[in-house]
Image (cartoon, coloured by chain):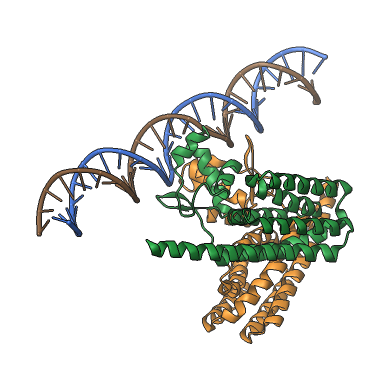
Chain colours: A green, B orange, C brown, D blue
Amino acid sequence: MDALRQRIIDGEFQAGESLNQVTIAREYAISRIPLREAMRQLEAEGLLLFQPGKGAVVSGLSMSEIGEVIDLRAMIEPDILGKAIPRLTTADLEQAKRILDDYETAFKKNEVATWGEYNWRFHSTLCAPSGCSIAMGVLQSLHHLNERYAKVQISVTHWQERAAHEHREILAACRKRDRQKSTRLLQDHILSAGQSLIALLEQQRHSNEKTAKAK
Amino acid sequence: MDALRQRIIDGEFQAGESLNQVTIAREYAISRIPLREAMRQLEAEGLLLFQPGKGAVVSGLSMSEIGEVIDLRAMIEPDILGKAIPRLTTADLEQAKRILDDYETAFKKNEVATWGEYNWRFHSTLCAPSGCSIAMGVLQSLHHLNERYAKVQISVTHWQERAAHEHREILAACRKRDRQKSTRLLQDHILSAGQSLIALLEQQRHSNEKTAKAK
DNA sequence: TTCATATAAAGTGTATACACGATACCATCG
DNA sequence: CGATGGTATCGTGTATACACTTTATATGAA
């Protein structure tokens, strides 16, 4: 299921495109039964939508829905980080640092496909010690929804650099156990990334409309 | 799927109990295939957990997880209500009032099974005009998780009366389009209900431990 | 009796099969 | 030529079938 989810997030299937069960099942060398079960779970996560007689269709988020995902993350994640901070161990902080290092290495090598993965690993490494399993599940779901669209950001170099800088700042505040500062930085980080994402998507949509008109 | 979800919420199946696919499929006169698909969705909602070789097991929330669900609701729902308030129509407000009336009628008639339904309908009627579809989905999921445990509250008469009073107050604040007041009242409502729920569950757990010792 | 082991029963996980509905293609009619 | 209807193809939705796993039951030894 994770593999299929990643393929949807990676944009291999366009929004609105319906997934052929026979083909995909064959790709994983399984029958349609377990595939459909996985698809039903992805449906519950909001990535797919079953249309009667048409199977699973990749669901697309409207601009306002993308905004919602960001707002929810901006609301929940800093709160969870706040709960995690007193519980953060040195090992947690070291791992977060390692993830950032690896992320920057991957960035220099232009391994764009791994960006989303590193991003989530950084955020979740800092939040996980909160012990909030339900909230972490919600967050991960939101992150998956976000990631599909965030792919357009990975190519924008200066945004990458800004994100990297903000990550370092957040980590530094966590290291100091500065709850106020780290949660505020995290919230700003999510919201500013969200705003730049929405601006990019608006821009993209406009240029698409232009080319559509050109036809 | 909704019917099965309700049966789990209603407590027909105990936490930890595994659901017999053959039996349940027969009850709905379907085969195990669509049943399993429904179960997978309920798994993604956090109500079930598939254990390899053992099928779907009803998942139980720990006390801290129940607390998390309440905290998340207390964080998200007032925010959504705030966004909904400028968009609330007279029809929305009337419908909310009608739900409260029906709820109180049902309360007087002791129709306990309908409580959770009325509660969600009231909350969602006020929040839905926000147009936040993603957040509403998250909220509904959280509400389902909550509802299973909230069932212990329905028998506590004075809590019911307090909730009814708080609902009326929230509705009055919404009618006045008082964003500040209504969101604050809603947050207090969720948190105080949550606290009383946790207190009840703690109490229940203690008495269970005593009877367990008595054996 | 109690524990261990063998055997039977029940249940899950999934491949296969088939019926139904959607879609594409083509021929026919206006 | 475009529109309409018919047929063939493809794909979904789910019932059935079967292999494998877990659980219950029975049997025998300590």
Query: Residue at left 49%, top 45%?
Result: B34
Q: Is residue A215 left or right of residue A139?
A: left
Q: Is residue A16 left or right of residue D6?
A: right
In this view, B173 is above or below B163: below
Q: Quadrant of the C terminus of chain A?
A: bottom left
Q: Of A201 and A86, which appears nearest the observer?
A: A201
Query: Residue at left 61%, top 65%?
Result: A68
- Residue B203 x/y as whole percent: 82, 60
- Residue B24 x/y as whole percent: 53, 45
Q: Of A30 and A90, which appears nearest the observer?
A: A90
- Residue A130 x/y as whole percent: 80, 55
In this view, C30 is above or below A10: below
Query: Residue at left 81%, top 46%?
Result: A95
**Exactly how many numbered labels are in the figure?**
0
Question: In this rendering, does residue B105 appear at all?
Answer: no
Question: In this rendering, does residue A170 appear at all?
Answer: yes
Q: Quadrant of the N terminus of chain A?
A: top right
In this view, B150 is above or below B53: below
- Residue D11 x/y as whole percent: 40, 43
